[in-house]
Image (cartoon, grey):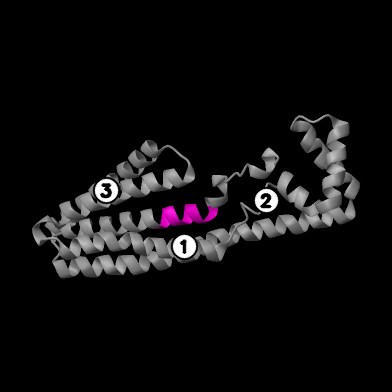
Amino acid sequence: MSRLRVHSENHLVKRIGWLRAAVFGANDGILSTSSLIVGVASASGSAHEILVAGTAGMVAGAMSMAAGEYVSVSSQSDTEKSDLARERKELADDPDGELRELTQIYVKRGLDEPLAREVGIKLMKKDALGSHARDELGISEITTARPIQAAFVSALMFSFGAILPLLMALFSPANIIIQTVSVASLAALALLGAVGAKVGGASILKATMRVMFWGAFAMVITAGIGAIFGTRI
């Protein structure tokens, strides 16, 4: 049996679409909700006010994430479709010019021109638009924008992330809500950063420290603002 038949590769870039939306959604859910709770608690809000604010933040945040991701990724998708339509027309109007263009791309990648032209001819014969989309425009099946998937995953993961600080606020004694929510949220952010790095094949320590730093920074800022406004009120 040849090595080619037994060797299996599972490249992590295939996960980039849903992974980005999932990690971003969960991270934002934890950070936004915990910061909101800490800010309200610092302003001497009652337990009821804290929970109402946190719940409202969770629902509003999930809807905002879904809408934002859908609009953003839809814009990317529209751009991709426009570029593909333009490329399709160019292939129909000037196939020889498009072959020369593809040949030069392969020459720049290290092939001799005769070989680059031969590769271009064979690839365009099999799938001209696909070849130009991949090698000229950088559009492939892996990187193609998927608006609905991004919106759904972002909203779902935001909600899951937001549940943690809400539960901490719900079951924590009133006098230590800030500490409980902050510690639990930072721990969750650290875990999320580690998991995201592991799944994506990145540095676990770097990702964990980065997300914890920005999480702590956001909570300190909102706690300070809450304390200032709470004192003035």
Q: Is residue 10 above or below residue 177?
A: above
**Would you name the residue on which mark 1 appears?**
153
Q: Secondary structure at mark 2?
A: loop
Spatial separation of the CA atoms under disc 2 and disc 1? 22 Å
Give the extent of the magenta segment: 17-25
Amino acid carrying mark 3 in the image: Ala
Q: Is residue 20 magenta?
A: yes
For marks 3 and 2 on the same chain, the one whose residue lies earlier in the sequence: 2
Q: Position of residue 101 (x, y in %)?
A: 82, 41
Amino acid carrying mark 1 in the image: Val
Q: Can the viewer see residue 136?
A: no
Task: Quadrant for residue 176, please give it.
Answer: bottom left
Image quadrant occupied by the C terminus: bottom left
Residue shown at 48% from the left, 66% from the top: 152
Q: Position of residue 36 (x, y in %)?
A: 26, 59
Spatial separation of the CA atoms under disc 3 and disc 2? 37 Å
**Would you name the residue on which mark 2 appears?**
139
Q: Secondary structure at mark 1?
A: helix
**Would you name the residue on which mark 3 appears?**
187
Q: Is residue 222 left or right of residue 47?
A: right
